[in-house]
Image (tube, grey):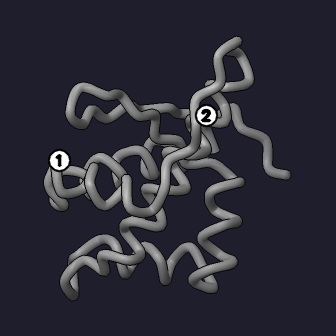
Amino acid sequence: MQDTMKHINSKGLEYPLVFNLNVMEKIQEKYGSYEKWGDLTDGKDNEINIGALKFGILEMINEGIDIENESKEVKREFITDKQVGRIITDMGMKDLAEKMQETVIDSTKNDSTEKNV
């Protein structure tokens, strides 16, 4: 796993997207496995599950905010489920799902120098 932070913009506000072990843990708790969640959000076999998409984006943005807050004097508030819905509406479900998947893929790429734990 790699520390990768991407950013999205909605209505003039920038939001960080991070996919790491903390986010994976939340997804496993809610969906049973990362794979099940991925099947719900990739839209390959069925339409994208909006609830699963919103959950993943919410966790990814809030993890990014939490990481950014560690180094900032002024702390940013976490976003809510309703705010995520508005961000998705503004950016478009397809575009945001693609950005989310890009973040997941970039974060989970195998690095040849990475040690197996």
Residue pointed to by mark 2: 3
Which label belongs to residue 91? 1
User: What is the count of numbered marks?
Assistant: 2
Q: Residue at x 55, y 48 (%)?
A: 19
| Residue 100 in the image, given as x and y percentages of width and height | 36, 51
Q: In the rendered view, tell whether residue 111 sits above or below residue 45.
A: above
The residue positioned 63% from the left and 62% from the top of the image is 24
Residue nearest the viewer, comparing 57 with 102: 57
Residue 109 shows in the view: no
Q: Nearer the viewer, residue 73 or 23?
A: 73
- Left or right of residue 14: residue 28: right
**Dot 1, crowdedness within 10 Å: few (<14), some or many (≥20)?**
some
Give the secondary structure at mark 1.
Answer: helix
Q: Quadrant of residue 14?
A: top left
Q: Is residue 108 above or below residue 30?
A: above
Q: Say if 115 sits above or below 6 in the image.
A: below
- Residue 6, image x and y in percent? 41, 32
Query: Horizontally, is 27 left or right of 70 in the view?
Result: left
Q: Please state, as top left, top right, bottom left or bottom right, where the N terminus lies in the image.
A: top right
How would you rate the neighbour count of disc 2 (Cα within 10 Å): few for under 14, some for 14-19, many for 20 or more? few
Mark 1 against mark 2, which lies toward the viewer? 1
Residue 72 is drawn in which quadrant? Answer: top right
- The residue under the point 53% across, 42% down is 18
In the structure shown, which secondary structural element does the residue marked by tag 2 occupy? Answer: loop
**Amino acid under disc 2:** Asp
